[in-house]
Structure formats: C-alpha cells, structure tokens
Amino acid sequence: MNGSTKVTECPKCGGKELGKGKHSGYAVMVPVNKVMSFGSDVEYIICTECGFIIESYVKKPEKFNEIQPEVPFLKNSMEF
Ligand SMILES: [Zn+2]
C-alpha cells in the first residue's frame, strides 16, 4: 500500500504485468485548436497480458491549457 492512485493491475483481465509505452517522433498528441503547436509525446500504461491501454498521458499537459498564452517567447521574457 503506497497510497498513490497508480494502477497496479489491469481492470480488464486482472493481469499484474504492466508495461509503459510511449509515442515518439511524429506520433504526438497535438492540441486541436493550436495549429502552430508542437504537441506532446504520449505515454501509456499497458497491460502486457491482454494489451489493454489502462492509462494514457501526454508528457506536457500544460500545452493543452487553453488559458496559456499562444506566444512562448513572450512568456519566457517575462520570467527574466
Ligand atoms: Zn489485461
């Protein structure tokens, strides 16, 4: 019991062998309404028994925050 919400077994088959996978290269998730964005890699928690994708994450969820300013260099200059 570690108190975290981390998944330790497959809800489909009950398998406890979970693997981690990721999309890389061009297979990135991109925000639908930000054409100029580079998007973010996607990481998966996968059941290695049945192949069910238990969880999926984007590595940089902040890229999908619609409140964030569109212009990255403006944000960077404000941090100095
Ligand atoms: Zn499974």
Image: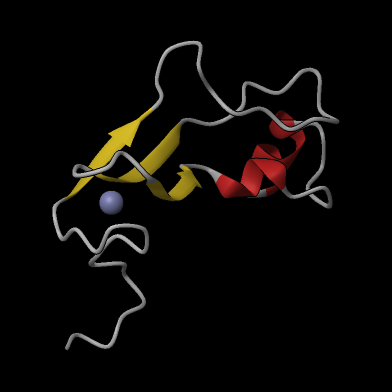
The residue drawn where x is 39% and y is 39% is: 43
Location of the N terminus (image quadrant): bottom left
Can you name the residue that lies furthest to the top here?
Answer: 26
The residue drawn where x is 31% and y is 70% is: 6
Q: Is residue 79 left or right of residue 12?
A: right
Q: Is residue 30 above or below residue 20?
A: above
Between 40 and 1, the residue placed more toward the observer is 1
Q: Is residue 3 left or right of residue 49?
A: right
Tag count in the figure? 0
Residue 38 lies in what quarter of the image? top right
The residue drawn where x is 46% and y is 46% is: 56
Residue 77 lies in what quarter of the image? top right
Q: Position of residue 47 (x, y in %)?
A: 26, 47
Q: Is residue 12 above or below residue 26?
A: below
Q: Is residue 5 above or below residue 59?
A: below
The residue drawn where x is 84% and y is 52% is: 67
Q: Position of residue 70 (x, y in %)?
A: 82, 34
Q: Is residue 34 above or below residue 10?
A: above
Q: Position of residue 35 (x, y in %)?
A: 81, 19
Q: Is residue 58 left or right of residue 35?
A: left
Residue 25 lies in what quarter of the image? top left
Q: Is residue 72 left or right of residue 5?
A: right
- Colour option used: secondary structure
